[in-house]
Image (tube, rainbow, N blue to C red):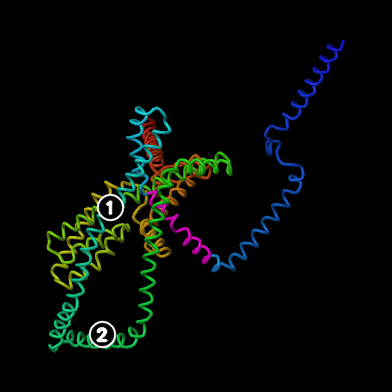
Amino acid sequence: MEEERDILESEKEKKRKKDYGAENAYYSARPQFGAKGPSKLRQQFGRGITIFLVVAASIMFYFALLRLTNLSEMLKEIIGVLQPVIYGCVIAYLLNPIVRNVDRYLLPILERNMKKRESAERFSRGLGVLAAVLVLIFLIVTLCNLLIPELYYSIRNMIFTLPGQLNNLVDALNEMATSDTTTSAFLKTAVEEGTHMLETWLRTDLLAKTNELMSNLTVGVINVISTLFDFVIGLIVSIYILFSKETFTSQCKKSVYALFSPHRANMILHFTTKSNEIFGGFVIGKIIDSAIIGVLCFFGLSVLDMPYVMLISVIVGVTNVIPFFGPYIGAVPSTILIMLSDPMKGLYFVIFILVLQQFDGNILGPKILGNSTGLSAFWVIVAILLGGGLFGFVGMVMGVPTFAVLYYVAELIVNSKLERKNLPASSKMYDPISYVDDEGNYMSGKEEEKMEKIVEEIVEDLEKEAGETSKEK
């Protein structure tokens, strides 16, 4: 009896523990927030909360406009603090094609020879990042070794020869001024006024601003050292970004799908991919194009025996990064420098630059860049003027791809609205003859011409039949 009683009690204890575990198992499961939709309270006060948020946002926007100067200064300070991170992102973006190509060719070989795929991926990524950094350092060191000595000698020769060239120019003007002509009198007056203005500027403005110039020079040296330090930190940051780019991409993609509906999330990701395609194709292609133009300019000027070969080649190559206006911006000061040395060589340089830019615009540029932006020449000019006016040199370079992305978004919105109305999306279909009737049907000019021809033929046939019947009668 006692054994049966113990067995019953043990069975009851097991049953009690089982029931207790089953009850707690439900609560141990992870809850789902918002599984049953919004609560009644939220449904009841949803409209009032929306009105309150709109009013609060309007008030905050008003005070933000009042404190716009403080906000812009704070934004500049934040950008200054994060400048190494920005440099790192730019460097990583430029080095990413090298890392991607190394992974593409090296990773399949390592996967066949290594047991673990993760080890192969880490090893391939490490070699890719190392190769990209070595290529960057090699380019920087090579450019510095080639450019700095040549630039030093070019600037040194310019400093020593420029006063003599200016004296020769003044002597030539004085010889022209000795003749009794209207042009000589005008030149004599212009030289006297220019000399007087220069003496006044040297005595008053230059001496008064010597301390300011020295302080600005000191600040400039400090800024250069700070920029170099930020660049080194940015290079380190870019290495971390290149090693973890898949992780960052996955986190951003997850956040987009979490914050937006699937349709809007896919649209945002599509715009991001298209922007990467436009920016990557334009920036990297333009850098390669400008480097080739700088090298061709160096060899061409060397063959033509021009002065300041390296200095002018660097100016032409750097300014060629700016679309459309870049070649002319670089050619103007270069032409002035060469004409001070030899006017005929300055004329030859202008002809050489025109030929070089025709080669770049019609042959080299389309081969490298293709139609990466999809913009016409008019919109390129608008983008350069707007970007340069707002953000300077960086705006002139990055204004074209940025405007190309905005143009693509606007074109996509317009085309989607036309497709909903069952209208053609191609701009060529909207010629001066075509139109859309009141019922929303597209009528091309060719169809209208065909209808008119058919009507004319029918009318002619009817007139012929009427004439034949009248003759028979």
* Vertical arrangement, residue 53 with respect to residue 20, above or below: below
292 vs 64, left or right, is left
Task: State which quarter of the image contains the N terminus.
Answer: top right
Name the one closer to the observer, 334 or 21.
21
Amino acid type, callout 2:
Gly
Q: Which mark is residue 166?
A: none
| Quarter of the figure with the C terminus | top left
| Vertical comparison of 371 with 307: above or below | above
Q: Amino acid at mark 1?
A: Leu
The image position of residue 267, as x and y in percent, is 51, 42
280 horizontally vs 346: left or right: right
Name the residue rendered at 17%, 82% in the picture: 170
Look at 49% across and 46% down and name the residue there: 413
Q: Which mark is residue 139?
A: 1
> Magenta segment: does it hold 76?
yes
Per the rendered image, the range of residues in magenta is: 72-93
